[in-house]
Image (tube, grey):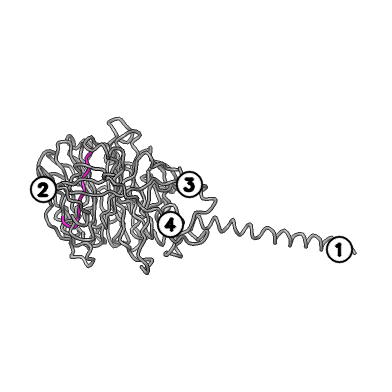
Amino acid sequence: MSKPRWFLLMLAAVLVAALSAPHASAQTSARTGARTGAPSETPVTDPIPEKPIVSGLSLTLHQVATLPKSAPVPPPTDPRLNRWARINYLGQLPDGRMYVPDLNGKLYMLQHGQPHEYLDLSTVFAPDFASGRGLGSGFAFVTFHPDFARNGKFYTVHTEAGNALTARTADWTQPGAVLHGVLTEWTAKDPSAGTFSGTHRELLRLGFAGVVHGFQQIDFNPTARRGDKDYGLLYVTAGDGGRGATTDDPQNLSIPHGKILRIDPQGTNSPNGKYGIPATNPFAGRPGALGEIYAVGMRDPHRFSWDPRWPHRMYLGHIGEHAIESIYEVRAGDNFGWSEREGSFVYNKADRCHLYTLPQDDKKYGYTYPVAAYDHDPPAGWPCTADSGHAVIGGFVYRGLRIPSLYGKYVFGDGVDGRLFYTVADEMRRGSGERATMYQLGLFDDTGRQVTMQDLAGGTRVDLRFGRDNAGELYILCKANGKVWKVTGARWAKS
């Protein structure tokens, strides 16, 4: 007996719904997973099983300086801040003077290995200057304008607390800010003087909700020449303030947190009128987005540098959250995915103990993934949300002349345990789907004794940093004992 037409129509609708519902649900899940970090598949137990290869190449280090002992203010409760001197970079001016900033406030000039104080930020910004509240707090970085010899201008970032949190208004702030990060322009009356005398003005002030991941490196592109569109533009890295693990701050284009910014310190078209927003920035003029933003999606964008060789690629060492320490090649408009991604894995805010594989439709979201990376490999039983003692420190592509066996290699390291690594710059190709092979470097002191950075630091926590001089030669710094070494040679192990 035939069924009524209404019954057949109802049955067809039920069958269509039953057949299509699982497919629609899967599509929705994939979209949610890619945007929010919800698990797309099973957890990944060992995200990067490939370990750095012991290369057989070792560097020779020669000690060139020891910086004066310093102390954080206020006295810290975190013992990791109690270092001999919290030195975090070495650079060189065109006139040959080398400079080293100490997070505890002082900027030193080095001549013939002897440090002398050029400027003390802890005094200038007292009593609000704060270097004892978090690993990155204090005098984070300094960079000199490419025309410093003529205009006397240089730039610093530091942190403030105390009265600054209520008496000063941040240009942008996270809720419940506990530190202000401050970008300052200094103008020296006599750029050749051994001690600073001049004026300063504030360019930018950000409020950070945590004592980690604030302002990090600031720098000018040293490969840009007068007349280039990048000449005189200041790159500023701003971390997520510790909020990225639980919020979308790094993906929010209306705030500067978790971003690399690029500004014109001589301009005036910013919201506060104290700096300029370059028209060539990728988000300039986009409604709802900050024109200052150069790249987005970062947790702790710690150190960056440019390859001196054309096409002068920019590389960033990015400190991860759960497991991944990454090196990125940075281009305008990039999104490195945090906190939807950690490295090239899905980060799930609801499950901070695991990472997940990428969804099949991942390409449509446009994230940029690392050109080199390694994972943490904590010991068995280690709490999954505890600091496992790893932090990548970005370095430099070596293009110097003294050490041919290093030429074309990107040298970087782990700041905590002091291991030194390299990758071949030509193998760090973004978009290839493969990461460059990582190699671990050995070390010798200048007496020929084989050593580790822990040996040289006198302890298991090294707090390693890098520097580079005008000739492209490399330097290694250690907060543990305030010493600076120059890389003077390299040797291959005998087969």
Q: Quadrant of residue 185?
A: top left
- The residue drawn where x is 30% and y is 59% is 212
Q: Are marks 2 and 1 in contact (CB under 8 Å)?
A: no
Under mark 3, the amino acid is Gly
Q: Under tag 3, what secondary structure?
A: loop
Whole-angstrom CA distance, mark 3 to mark 4, is 21 Å
Q: Residue beneath label 3, please?
A: 366
Q: What segment is highlighted magenta in the picture?
A: 472-481
Q: Which label was assigned to residue 115?
A: 2
User: Which residue is most to the top?
Assistant: 227
The earlier-in-sequence mark between 2 and 3 is: 2
Q: Residue beneath label 1, please?
A: 3
Under mark 2, the amino acid is Pro
Q: Which label was assigned to residue 47?
A: 4
Q: Under tag 1, what secondary structure?
A: loop
Whole-angstrom CA distance, mark 1 to mark 4, is 58 Å
